[in-house]
């Protein structure tokens, strides 16, 4: 063998040895620490315990987090496009401004989780449990929330147009200022829900849909033939009522300011001491 080819062979062997000795990249490793801004797209982390993990601004596109616990996790502004979160536990997790387009959160636990300003367009939250969660200003256009429990959840200002809300439980939920026009509400339970300024035009509902005790006001939008029987109308407070309340508070505060402070009794030494 010519010397040139022999040297080339030795060089290739050395390179192969160096590559073999290089430790694996930590890019796919996740633990309960700080992983801000890391790229874990398409990683597989199902059935793991990641409670308290910090994934702010992380790229988690198409990540598999099935059956994974993420309690108290921080995923602010994380990208979870097409992520798999089936049966994941996100109790008290913070997903403010996170991107969850077409993410799958079926049977997930989202109790007390924060999705403020998050984008869940086309996401699947069927059968999820999200008691007292926060979805203020979130985008849930064409999302699936069928048979999920969102009792007490805050959806104020959320965009929920053309969503599948069939069989969803929204008892006591606050949907004030939200847009759920064109959504499917067949069999949904909105008893005691707040619908102040909510757009309900074009919704699809049936006899099983329960609006009993739901609150609405002059800003709530219904279709012309919608029957508001059983709902509670909240009148807008008049200017006179607000003025009277303000004057009452002002007078009370002035009275408290003029009221003399209680005098501290003067202590005298006891005789014989």
Image (spheres, helix red, strand yellow):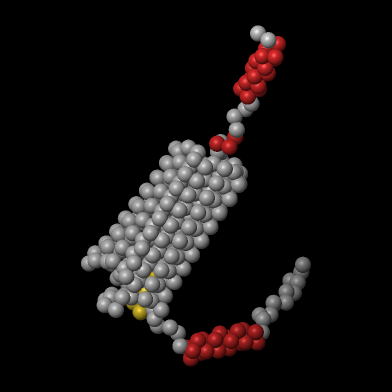
> Which residue is found at the position 40% from the left and 64% from the top?
160
Q: Give 198 or 90, whichever is nearer the viewer.
A: 198
Q: Give 115 or 234, whichever is nearer the viewer.
A: 115
- Residue 69 seen by the camera: no
The correct choice, above or below, for 14 with respect to 61 in the image is above
Please state, as top left, top right, bottom left or bottom right, where the N terminus lies in the image. top right
Indicate the position of residue 2 as horizontal and vertical percent values: 68, 10
Please state, as top left, top right, bottom left or bottom right, where the C terminus lies in the image. bottom right
Indicate the position of residue 228 as horizontal and vertical percent values: 29, 76
- Residue 240 seen by the camera: yes
> Which residue is found at the position 74% from the left and 74% from the top?
268
Q: Quadrant of residue 35?
A: top right
Please give the count of numbered marks on the rendered protein: 0
Q: Residue furthest right?
A: 273
Left or right relative to 149: residue 237: right
> Which residue is found at the position 38% from the left and 72% from the top?
199
């Amino acid at each position: 063998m010519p010397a040139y080819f022999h040297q080339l062979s030795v060089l290739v062997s050395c390179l192969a040895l160096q590559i073999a000795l290089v430790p694996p990249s930590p890019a796919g490793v996740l633990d309960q620490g700080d992983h801000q801004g890391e790229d874990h797209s398409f990683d597989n982390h199902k059935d793991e315990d990641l409670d308290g993990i910090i994934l702010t601004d992380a790229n988690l596109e198409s990540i598999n987090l099935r059956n994974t616990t993420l309690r108290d996790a921080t995923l602010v502004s994380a990208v979870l496009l097409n992520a798999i979160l089936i049966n994941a536990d996100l109790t008290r997790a913070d997903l403010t401004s996170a991107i969850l387009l077409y993410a799958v959160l079926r049977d997930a636990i989202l109790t007390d989780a924060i999705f403020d300003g998050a984008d869940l367009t086309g996401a699947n939250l069927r059968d999820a449990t999200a008691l007292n969660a926060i979805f203020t200003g979130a985008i849930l256009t064409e999302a699936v929330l069928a048979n999920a429990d969102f009792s007490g959840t805050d959806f104020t200002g959320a965009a929920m147009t053309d969503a599948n809300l069939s069989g969803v439980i929204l008892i006591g939920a606050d949907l004030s200022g939200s847009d759920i026009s064109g959504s499917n509400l067949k069999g949904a339970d909105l008893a005691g829900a707040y619908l102040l300024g909510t757009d309900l035009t074009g919704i699809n509902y049936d006899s099983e849909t329960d609006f009993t005790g739901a609150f609405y006001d002059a800003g709530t939008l219904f279709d012309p033939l919608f029957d508001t029987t059983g709902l509670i109308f909240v009148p807008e407070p008049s200017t006179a009522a607000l003025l009277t309340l303000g004057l009452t508070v002002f007078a009370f505060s002035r009275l408290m300011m003029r009221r003399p402070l209680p005098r501290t009794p003067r202590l005298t030494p006891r005789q014989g001491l």
